[in-house]
Image: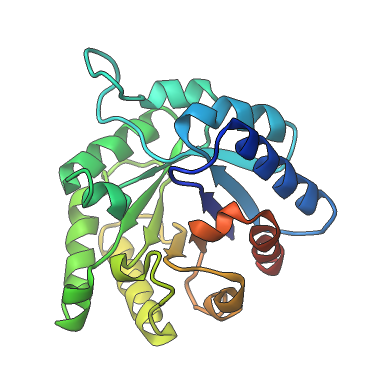
Amino acid sequence: MLIAGNWKLNCNIKEAEDLSSSILNNLNHNSYKSEIAIFPPTIYIETVSNIIKNSNISLGAQDCSINISGAYTGDVSAPMLNDFGCKYSIVGHSERRNGKYESNKDVYLKAKNVMEYNMIPIICVGENAKDRDEGNALNIIKNQLDKSIPKINKEFIIAYEPIWAIGSGKIPTLDSINEMFNMIRQWLLNSGMNNNIKILYGGSVNKGNAKELFSCKHLGGLLIGGVSLNPNEFSEICIMAS
């Protein structure tokens, strides 16, 4: 089970230090079996890395460039993230697919770069409220899987985050999540891929609904946004996952 905390565009350097230190301290005083990863803003990756080094907490990036090097002002490449000791990189988050107009091809290229530099991409997929209401969610996600995931024999993770659930306080029914996870498992099987690939759920995860989410049959972990900025609640969910 992987519990991943995506801090998004939050924290100044002091807050990043305090947040990572608090999570580390909370987990050091409790027993847990899940893997924990935190994803600070890129500019604070080195700061957080220095705090969590020699711990069981893994480090991840919130995104990476489709390019490896060159005249791409502002981009951060997969080899650069690898230099900082990142184990994971999120790619294809809906906030980038929608807000930055990233295509499935962009997500594919980013995931490929992450894999080729010996990190693990967390490839995000999700439908909007209109697609869900019209009964198209499964087809939308299958299309994203088809076009976003490189056919490379490298480890990756799929994160299912319904767009309408992110930050809304709402989550799908367990039946809906299980239906989606079953489709993703079947897609992996049909694609000849490792059926042990983790599938995470993300979107308005909190301490109150985490226990219910942990009952989902194929759940491989959680991708947590806002609550990951609360070290006590995030740590409690990490411990619950054990």
Q: Give the quadrant of residue 73.
A: top left
Tell how many labels. Answer: 0
* Residue occupying the point 54% across, 40% down: 11
Closest to the observer, 89 or 23: 23
Q: Give the quadrant of residue 59.
A: top right
Name above or below for residue 65 compared with residue 122.
above
Closest to the observer, 43 or 124: 43
Name above or below for residue 113 compared with residue 215.
above
Quarter that holds the C terminus:
bottom right
* Residue occupying the point 37% across, 72% down: 181
Residue 56 located left or right of residue 16:
right
* Residue occupying the point 25% across, 43% down: 107
Q: Can residue 85 be seen from the camera position used here?
A: no
Q: Position of residue 87 (x, y in %)?
A: 53, 36
Closest to the observer, 65 or 105: 65
Q: Position of residue 167 (x, y in %)?
A: 40, 65
Residue 201 located left or right of residue 102:
right
Q: Position of residue 143 (x, y in %)?
A: 17, 61
Q: Can residue 208 be seen from the camera position used here?
A: yes
Q: Give the quadrant of residue 179.
A: bottom left
Q: Position of residue 235 (x, y in %)?
A: 69, 58
